[in-house]
Image (cartoon, rainbow, N blue to C red):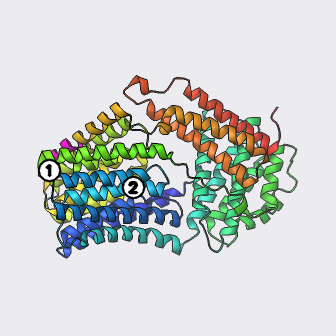
């Protein structure tokens, strides 16, 4: 099996997380500026949640968006707290921040993250009276985020094409396996197809339209080639055919050139070798003929023209406005409950901001995950505090937990909350709030979760277009659009339509899986939706085969 290129990328993200959280905290403790150290570490911590595996321009865009968003939120929150004090002004400030932040959620990934972080920054600013001039904490928060941005960009700038090469090599490897499994219509064949789709998606994200610089044209030619190979894998599955061993070896030769790192034009170099390797191969089968032509002939047009652009599919304006109003009202109630309980606080509205999202599936699943992860994280923290009773031990704990965060994020929300809870409580301990708040934070989490569940039960906070039935309809429409426009479209547009169809199918399947966990039977998906999605995917596959090599008999 081809090695996933993002395993090394996850290791790099873990190192950046440990540095982005541990270094500011260490500097703050050594300089006797614990509050600023914690705030800077919090900025690094929040930035890490946006540190993905795509090209550095996209990654930096998200990190910088949340950096300035939570810094602006923290500034507003601090000014309200210092000028108006605790009480109703804080509740109003939380509601306004949630209204603004909620309005931009559900658009692009960067704006969605920025919208949530405006709310988070305001919650922290109104909930914790941080010492020093009003501008110091926001500056420290921004500095922590910029540290993560810098450490994220530097390795990619020094080795600009390594991740692109590995991602492309990964896609070629799965294309070779897919062409070998063309006659397998069982679970193994479905798994290979799924892995190829993921590899192609990763390669297209990494070699997106924002990529620039020396050597990118050759890699873009390779991406255009492997995208077309992905089509031919689908054709092979529809026709129940495989390609000769020599052809599969030719794909692996391209992968070897890309992984070796030698040469400035690995795809072109492999193409020159494959002309000799594939000379005399029987090309009577149309799939084999197309693959051989792709691997041996110079591209007729630049690869950039064939690379599908990723399209942002946000929620409709009316749904975003509805969610913004619901979020503002819920956060305001959370702030009011915190005011009644302790005269002020941040944990309840913070829980609401994390759990109540317009685009991440059923709220019940996230709410239960938040509660479960917090309880488990508090138990883990309590044990750690008993064993590590000095600052050095706590710094080690938070650094290790931060290093685990990128892996936890990819495992699920429960794991993410389990890892981040010790980090937050170490922050509180360094600030001097101590470990006496462990039980109180669990109770606050329960209150926040119950509040969100009540709002979701009464008002259905999830956006209508994000619900299961709507996602299936979107998948049907995307498949129909591809079938109608694909045959006559330019290659780049055709690949984009096909990618949209598969993305819609993936979202619909994920929505069906999540909705099956809903506690209310009325919200669970119909039993036939899985079979309906299988039919849609089959229609997309047949349309792909007809576009690529002609009608399927």
- Secondary structure state at the residue bearing disc 2: helix
Q: Residue at x 74, y 45 (%)?
A: 486
Q: Residue at x 44, y 29 (%)?
A: 516
Horizontally, residue 86 falls left or right of residue 297, namely left
In terms of depth relative to the viewer, which is nearer, 529 or 435? Answer: 529
In terms of depth relative to the viewer, which is nearer, 348 or 30? Answer: 348
In terms of depth relative to the viewer, which is nearer, 141 or 202? Answer: 141
Horizontally, residue 198 falls left or right of residue 257, namely left
* Residue 237 vertical position relative to residue 147 in the rendered view, above or below: above
Quadrant holding the C terminus: top right
Range of magenta residues: 438-445
Q: Residue at x 38, y 47 (%)?
A: 324
Q: Based on the displayed image, in which of its 4 quarters is residue 473 positioned?
A: top right
Q: Which residue is mark 2?
A: 115
The residue mark sitting in front, 1 or 2, is 2
The numbered dot on residue 525 is none
Q: Residue at x 78, y 57 (%)?
A: 295
The 10 Å Cα crowd at callout 2, few under 14, some 14 to 19, many 20 or more, is: many
Residue 337 x %, y %? 18, 44
Residue 21 x %, y %? 31, 64
Residues at marks 1 and 2, CA–CA distance in whole angstroms:
28 Å
Horizontally, residue 548 falls left or right of residue 353, namely right
Q: Based on the displayed image, in which of its 4 quarters is residue 132 positioned?
A: bottom left
Q: Is 444 covered by the magenta stretch? A: yes
The 10 Å Cα crowd at callout 1, few under 14, some 14 to 19, many 20 or more, is: some
Residue 164 seen in the current view = yes
Q: Is 415 covered by the magenta stretch? A: no
Q: Which residue is mark 1?
A: 437
Residue 177 seen in the current view = no
Residue 58 x %, y %? 51, 63
In terms of depth relative to the viewer, which is nearer, 449 or 388? Answer: 449
- Secondary structure state at the residue bearing disc 1: helix
């Amino acid at each position: 099996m081809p090695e996933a290129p993002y395993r090394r990328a996850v290791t790099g993200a873990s190192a950046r997380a440990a540095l982005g959280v541990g270094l500011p905290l260490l500097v703050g403790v050594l300089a006797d500026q614990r509050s600023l150290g914690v705030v800077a570490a919090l900025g690094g911590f929040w930035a890490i949640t946006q540190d993905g595996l795509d090209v550095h321009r996209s990654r930096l865009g998200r990190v910088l968006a949340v950096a300035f968003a939570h810094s602006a939120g923290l500034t507003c929150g601090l000014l309200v707290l210092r000028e108006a004090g605790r009480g109703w002004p804080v509740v109003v400030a939380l509601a306004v921040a949630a209204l603004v932040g909620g309005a931009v959620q559900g658009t692009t990934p960067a704006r969605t993250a920025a919208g949530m972080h405006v709310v988070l920054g305001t919650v922290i600013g109104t909930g914790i009276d941080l010492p020093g001039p009003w501008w110091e904490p926001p500056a420290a928060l921004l500095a922590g985020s910029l540290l993560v941005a810098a450490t994220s960009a530097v390795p990619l700038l020094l080795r600009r094409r390594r991740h692109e090469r590995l991602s492309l090599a990964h896609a070629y490897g799965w294309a070779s396996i897919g062409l070998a499994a063309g006659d397998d219509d069982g679970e193994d064949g479905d798994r290979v197809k799924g892995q190829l789709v993921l590899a192609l998606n990763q390669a297209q994200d990494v070699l997106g339209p924002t990529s620039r610089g020396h050597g990118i044209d050759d890699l873009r030619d390779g991406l255009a080639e492997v995208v077309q190979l992905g089509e031919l894998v689908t054709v092979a599955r529809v026709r129940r055919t495989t390609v000769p061993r020599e052809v599969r070896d030719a794909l692996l030769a391209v992968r070897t050139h890309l992984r070796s790192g030698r040469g400035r034009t690995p795809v072109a170099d492999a193409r020159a070798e494959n002309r000799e390797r594939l000379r005399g191969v029987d090309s009577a089968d149309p799939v084999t003929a197309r693959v051989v032509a792709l691997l041996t002939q110079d591209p007729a047009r630049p690869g950039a023209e064939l690379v599908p652009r990723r399209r942002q599919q946000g929620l409709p304006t009316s749904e975003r406005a509805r969610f913004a109003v619901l979020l503002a009202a819920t956060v305001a109630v959370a702030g009011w409950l915190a005011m009644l309980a302790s005269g002020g606080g941040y944990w309840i509205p913070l829980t609401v901001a994390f759990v109540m999202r317009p685009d991440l599936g059923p709220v019940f699943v996230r709410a239960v995950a938040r509660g479960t992860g917090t309880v488990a994280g508090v138990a883990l923290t309590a044990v750690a505090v008993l064993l590590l009773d000095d600052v050095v031990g706590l710094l080690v704990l938070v650094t290790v937990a931060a290093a685990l965060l990128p892996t936890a994020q990819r495992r699920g929300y429960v794991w993410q909350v389990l890892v981040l809870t010790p980090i937050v409580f170490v922050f509180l301990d360094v600030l001097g709030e101590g470990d006496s708040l462990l039980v109180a934070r669990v109770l606050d989490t329960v209150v926040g979760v119950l509040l969100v569940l009540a709002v979701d039960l009464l008002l259905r906070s999830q956006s209508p277009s994000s619900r299961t039935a709507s996602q299936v309809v979107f998948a049907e429409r995307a498949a129909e659009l591809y079938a109608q426009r694909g045959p006559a479209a330019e290659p780049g547009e055709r690949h984009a339509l096909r990618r949209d169809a598969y993305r819609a199918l993936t979202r619909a399947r994920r929505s069906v899986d999540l909705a099956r966990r809903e506690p209310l039977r009325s919200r669970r998906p119909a039993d036939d939706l899985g079979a309906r999605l299988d039919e849609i995917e089959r229609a997309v596959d047949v349309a792909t085969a007809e576009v690529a090599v002609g009608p399927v008999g």
